Image (spheres, grey):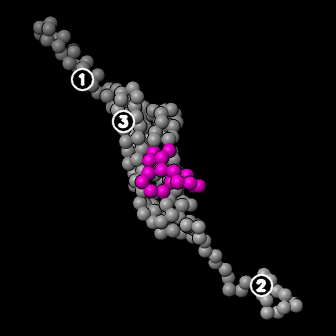
C-alpha cells in the first residue's frame, strides 16, 4: 500500500473516533415533575425539576429561570418567575403552587449559556384540578364541617332564650 494512503486511513480513523466523543453532545435541558395534576386552591404544589447537562456531564452552579402562565412559585404571593441554581448533579428544583381556580399552567425553564451565546428552553404542563378539602380555603372563604350534635357555646340561665 502506498504511504499516502496509509496516512489518509489513519487520519480518517482518528476523525471517526473524535466525532463519536461526548464533546459533541452539546447542552441538554430537560423538565420533569412529581405530579402533572394537583388540586386548585393555592395550597398544593408540584415539584418541577430541571436537569441541565453540558457535553454529557451535569452542569453545576448554573442559573435556570422558571416562568409560569398560571399558579405561583410562592405560597404567599403571586410570583410567576423565579431563578434556581443547579446543584452538583445539574438539577434545579422549584415548587409551583396551584391557582385558586381550576385550569392549566405551562412552566418554561430557560438557560442562557454565556460561553456559547445559546439559549436552551424546556416546557412542562401542570393541570389544576378540582379543589380537595386540603386545598381550601380559596379566595378568602373556608368551609366548616361539624357534627349535628354540637355543644352550645353560650347558654344563659338568666335569659334562656339566648343561646
Residue 140 at least partly seen = yes
Q: Is residue 87 above or below residue 10?
A: below
Residue 163, by quadrant, is bottom right
Q: Residue at x 17, y 13 (%)?
A: 8
Q: Would you name the residue on which mark 1 appears?
A: 16
Q: Residue furthest left?
A: 2
SS of the residue under disc 1: helix
Q: Would you name the residue on which mark 2 appears?
A: 152
Lower position in the chain sequence, tag 2 or tag 1: 1
Circle 1 crowding by C-alpha within 10 Å: few under 14, some 14–19, many from 20 = few
Residue 102, by quadrant, is bottom left
What span is colored magenta in the figure? 66-82
Q: Residue furthest bottom?
A: 161
Q: Position of residue 47 (x, y in %)?
A: 50, 51
Question: What type of secondary structure mainly makes up the magenta span?
Answer: loop
- The disc placed on residue 117 is none
Q: Would you say 78 lies left or right of 36 here? A: right
Q: Would you say 109 lies left or right of 11 here? A: right
Circle 3 crowding by C-alpha within 10 Å: few under 14, some 14–19, many from 20 = few
Q: Would you name the residue on which mark 3 appears?
A: 119
Q: Are marks 2 and 3 in contact (CB under 8 Å)?
A: no
Q: Position of residue 110 (x, y in %)?
A: 41, 41
Amino acid at each position: 500500500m502506498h504511504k499516502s494512503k496509509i496516512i489518509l486511513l489513519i487520519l480518517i480513523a482518528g476523525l471517526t473516533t473524535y466525532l463519536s466523543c461526548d464533546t459533541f453532545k452539546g447542552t441538554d435541558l430537560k423538565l420533569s415533575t412529581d405530579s402533572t395534576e394537583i388540586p386548585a386552591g393555592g395550597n398544593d404544589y408540584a415539584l418541577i425539576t430541571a436537569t441541565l447537562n453540558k457535553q454529557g456531564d451535569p452542569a453545576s452552579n448554573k442559573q435556570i429561570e422558571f416562568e409560569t402562565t398560571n399558579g405561583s412559585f410562592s405560597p404567599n404571593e403571586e410570583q410567576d418567575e423565579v431563578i434556581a441554581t443547579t446543584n452538583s448533579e445539574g438539577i434545579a428544583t422549584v415548587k409551583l403552587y396551584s391557582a385558586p381556580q381550576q385550569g392549566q399552567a405551562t412552566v418554561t425553564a430557560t438557560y442562557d449559556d454565556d460561553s456559547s451565546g445559546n439559549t436552551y428552553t424546556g416546557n412542562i404542563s401542570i393541570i389544576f384540578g378540582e379543589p380537595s378539602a386540603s386545598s381550601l380555603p380559596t379566595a378568602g372563604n373556608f368551609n366548616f364541617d361539624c357534627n349535628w350534635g354540637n355543644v352550645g357555646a353560650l347558654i344563659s340561665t338568666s335569659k334562656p332564650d339566648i343561646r
